[in-house]
Amino acid sequence: MPSLSERTQGFTDSVIRRMTRICMECDAVNLSQGFPDFDPPREILERLAEVSKEDFHQYSITWGAQNFREALAEKQTRFMGRKINPNTDIVVTCGSTEAMMAAMMSVVNPGDKVIVFSPFYENYGADAILSGAEPIYVPLHPPEFNFNADELEAAFRQNPKALILCNPSNPSGKVFTREELKYIAGLVEKYDTFVITDEVYEHIVFEPNRHIYFASLPGMWERTLSCSSLSKTYSITGWRLGYIIAPAEIIDVAKKVHDFLTVGAAAPLQEAAVTGLRFGDDYYADLAAKYTSKRDLFLKGLDDLHIAHTVPQGAYYILLDISEFGFESDLEFCELLARNVGVGAVPGSSFFREPVNHLIRLHFAKKDETLYAALNRLEDMRNKIPYRK
Ligand code: GLN
């Protein structure tokens, strides 16, 4: 037999998605892969039912249905604070997963370097390998997950083509401040690079933190490929609706990559999602309030169990410190947590470049009753997981 492609040998399947399969096998409360168990907004679902009887069953325009791009441009113009042109500045993709991949392939040549902050969402490693890029990892130092200015500039000195910026950040929950973003922007300008953002948690930010779109900083629109999706904002992760927003010259290239990767996102789903894109500002304030209450509920539960954890500023992930159990392998810990305790988590090692094995990631995008059920089960964690020291 001939050998399979070399590029696929550099990464494993997604540990996040693998943990979901394990949870299904053992009926664990799945707090591993980040997706909600509550319904999307009723208006979107009602529109979806209508759309099934209308004429949306064939391909839409490859870079996104006109109606969808117009609604998205209007919404993002409001939030990003600059006029987004629906015809030239947007490519609609199959989730932000495709948006990030298409963005990478649009700016990176094989052998180019890209800066990735660690910890990072596991897709970026695979995206880099698939597009032939070489990641330069820059640590975000716990507990604040701040970067060190010298370490970051040392990475820029290695002549990277782009920096990947997940903000609000998965899994650390960091929301970058304006000062931090301005510092990054200064280096981006000085060393002449692109920025590819992942801003899927843009509307899940906790007071007093504020989300600042990197593309909105002076001089950064020209260099930024802003990737995001509707998955987390409207609780429709299965619809796979994402997008890249960037200047027309970059979007022209991204359109080509996207066209040959997937042709387009699902036409009926784009049409139904327009209802969500047209929601007023109250919707986003309510979403942030809902997630703030879930975060507080879950953090209080963890405090009551005396489990050390991070306090997210945004997104919906918490890292728990499991050092007391003395496990060498956090993957093995997570498997036991799912099988013996009945709670699904993701091993922290899937996010860190550094050798970290004492953290696991849980998320709180779940109904309150699901979070209480998980906390209930976690109460028994110390009896059901054998200590290794
Ligand atoms: N972003 C989600 C997470 O980190 C998962 C997204 C996905 O699996 N596509 O869990």
Image: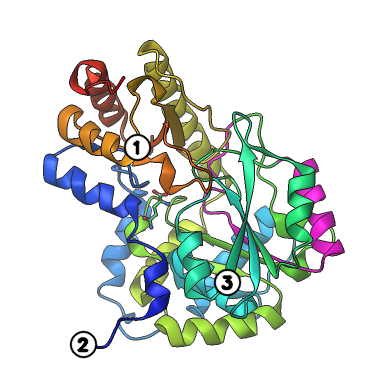
Amino acid type at mark 3 = Ala
Residue 44 appearing in the image: yes
Write down the region rendered in magenta: 177-206
Instruction: Looking at the picture, tell me which residue is in the foreground, 280 or 219.
Output: 219
Q: Are marks 3 and 2 in contact (CB under 8 Å)?
A: no
For marks 1 and 2 on the same chain, the one whose residue lies earlier in the sequence: 2
- The circle drawn on residue 133 is 3
Q: Identify the residue shown where x is 31% and y is 81%.
A: 4
Point out residue 208 in the picture as x, y percentages from the top left corner. 66, 29
Instruction: Looking at the picture, tell me which residue is in the foreground, 180 or 199.
Output: 180
Residue 62 appearing in the image: no
- The circle drawn on residue 200 is none
Point out residue 58 in the picture as x, y percentages from the top left corner. 33, 86
State yes or no: residue 192 in magenta.
yes
Residue at image mark 2 = 1
Instruction: Looking at the picture, tell me which residue is in the foreground, 332 or 197.
Output: 332
In the rendered view, tell whether residue 246 sits above or below residue 254: above
Local secondary structure at mark 1: helix
Q: Identify the residue shown where x is 26% and y is 72%.
A: 52
Point out residue 206 in the picture as x, y percentages from the top left corner. 58, 32
Point out residue 285 in the picture as x, y percentages from the top left corner. 55, 38
For marks 3 and 2 on the same chain, the one whose residue lies earlier in the sequence: 2
Q: How would you rate the neighbour count of disc 2 (Cα within 10 Å): few for under 14, some for 14-19, many for 20 or more?
A: few
Quadrant of the image occupied by residue 340 = top left
Residue at image mark 1 = 330
